[in-house]
Image (tube, rainbow, N blue to C red):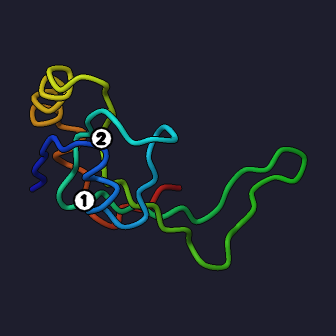
Amino acid sequence: MRTFKVITEARACKEIPGYTPVHNKPFGYVVQIIPPVISYTTGEDIEGIGWFQYQKPKKHIRNIACWTKRKALALCRLKECELSSYWRNLPDGEVDE
């Protein structure tokens, strides 16, 4: 089961490994996903070539649900994320094909 919390973007840059700010200078608020959503991509459709299969699946880690400028909006989004079946029911390691 996932939990969500609102943190400042500056704090997210320090706490979340590999997180880059949305703007040059971090400001605003993000909704953090705990534990992060992990998915894998096995290939992609390249125009003119067709389906290109990766030798190793690419790993995608989703640490945040959204970014907002104001804390009140972030708290509203937090409630939406908690009620959403999309974020709650995503298992770790889901394979996208």
- The mark that comes first in sequence, 1 or 2, is 2
Q: Which residue is mark 1?
A: 91
Placement of the N terminus among the 4 image quadrants: bottom left
Who is closer to the viewer here, 16 or 38? 16
Q: Is residue 42 left or right of residue 60?
A: right
For the residues carrying marks 1 and 2, which lies nearer the camera in this image? 2
Instruction: Look at 30% across and 48% down and name the residue there.
Output: 10
Q: 72 left or right of 58? A: left
- Give the number of the disc on residue 65: 2
Q: Amino acid at mark 2?
A: Ala
Furthest toward the right, the residue is: 48
Q: Residues within 10 Å of mark 2 (few under 14, many from 20)?
A: some
Label number found at residue 62 = none
> Number of callouts in the render?
2
Residue 53 picture location, percent across and down: 70, 67
Nearest the camera: 47 or 64?
64
Mark 1–mark 2 Cα distance, whole angstroms, equals: 15 Å
The kind of residue on which mark 1 rests is Pro
Q: Position of residue 24 (x, y in %)?
A: 52, 41
Q: Secondary structure at mark 1?
A: loop
Which residue is found at the position 15% from the left and 27% from the top?
80
Quadrant of residue 68 within the rendered picture: top left
